[in-house]
Structures are given as structure tokens and as C-alpha cells.
Image (spheres, rainbow, N blue to C red):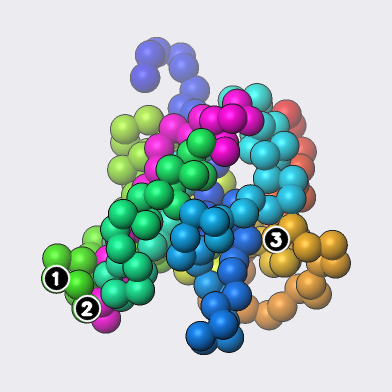
Amino acid sequence: MGIGKVAQAAVFLDRDGVLNALVLNPATGRMESPLTPEDLRLCRGVVEALFRLQQAGYPLILVSNQPNYALGKCSLDMLSRIHHKLVCELLGAGITFSRFCYCLHHPQGVTPGFSGLCVCRKPSPWFLLRARDDFRLSMARSWMIGDQPTDVQCGKAAGTRTIRIDGNCGGSDPLPVRQHPGPHPDCIATNLTEAAQTILSQDGC
Ligand SMILES: [Mg+2]
Ligand SMILES: [Zn+2]
């Protein structure tokens, strides 16, 4: 950092349930991460919201837990193809992330080399702190956006402000705000459009 230059603020983003919709897995009856590229659908308003944040000068950094390979639910190649589709859709809209951080581990995984404890799985702030050092970020001025209590914990542990998305990611009717256990986020938003508005207005952009 040069003399007199103010450290930059970044926006850290969770992926599933924030950028793309969760997908109903008929086998479990639960809303889960996409298992194929076809399953990956960006939530409504995401492209516009990311573009506004990018235009305002925030580096965008994705921080996502993707344990499905560790859990034996999909191949590494499939995870990579899902990631590639996301990158292509964003690039097509003129959006460039500064970094994509994926934790591929799981404490109860079954895949050798990807199972057991790791340093990077959220709520660990590990990826955020590495980005702080690499990009010389001001964490107090940065934001972490996610849809899980672990995202809020992660942001708080790294010293960022936090926004929890509490909505249905692209559907027409926002869900009522639910009570989550864990630390309180600084703000709650129903979608990324609202989250971006909060950031831009609080930071006076
Ligand atoms: Mg999520
Ligand atoms: Zn990890």
C-alpha cells in the first residue's frame, strides 16, 4: 500500500442461496447446493447487484463451502463444471471476481484427502484473512454476505460487517424473516439486490 492510500474495502460473497438458488433434492426433500451445471441458476437481480458493487469499486471475492465431493455426492469434475458455468455467466455480464475461494473439505467426509478438519471451512475466516493480506483490505470497511449463520460467524471472525440473506433467492414472494441461531448480522436482506443497496447507501456510494 502506498503512502496515503486508504486500504480497500471488499465484498465477500457466499455462493449457494446468495448468487444461485438452492435446488430441491428429491432424494432428501431438502434444498441443497446444485449437483450439476444445469442445476445452477443465478437468482433474480444478482447480475445487476454484482455489477453495481463492481462499478462502485469493491473487489468481489467468493467464499463457498462445497463438501459434496468430500461427502461422495458428486465428482470433482462436476464441481469444477458448476464453477465454470458460474464464471462464464458472470463474465458474460461483465462481472469479474477477484478471487474464488472454495473449501472442498468436510469433517465427516468419505473421500481421502478431503475429509476431516481443515483450516478453511466456514465459519473459519481463513480465506477472508488471506484475501485481506493479499489485497491489503480494510476488514472493518469490508462486507460478508451469506445466507447461513456460519457466514455471519465467518465475517465477524474476520472483522467485516455482515449481511444475512433471508429470502427465497429469486422467487416472487419473499419468505418471512426467520430466526436463526448464532450471532446477529449487521443487516438482513431478502436478496442480493437489497444487500447491495444497503452496502452502497451505508458506504455513501
Ligand atoms: Mg449459502
Ligand atoms: Zn477446507
In percent of width and height, residue 153 lies at 47, 65
Residue in front for this viewpoint, 75 or 55: 75
Q: Which mark is residue 110?
A: 2
Q: Which residues are magenta?
A: 89-109
Query: Is label 3 in a helix, a strand or a loop?
Result: loop
In the rendered structure, the answer to whether residue 171 lies left or right of residue 87 reads: right
Earlier in the chain: of badge 1 and badge 3, it is 1
Q: Quadrant of the C terminus?
A: top right
In percent of width and height, residue 179 lies at 68, 80
Q: Which mark is residue 112?
A: 1
Task: Return the residue found at the far top.
Answer: 3
Q: Is residue 158 visible?
A: no
Residue linked to disc 3: 169
Q: Residue at x 51, y 86 (%)?
A: 28
Residue 108 colored in magenta in the image: yes
Which amino acid type corresponds to the residue marked 2 in the rendered image? Val
Crowding at dot 1, Cα within 10 Å, few <14 / some 14-19 / many 20+, comes out as: few
Query: Is label 1 in a helix, a strand or a loop?
Result: loop
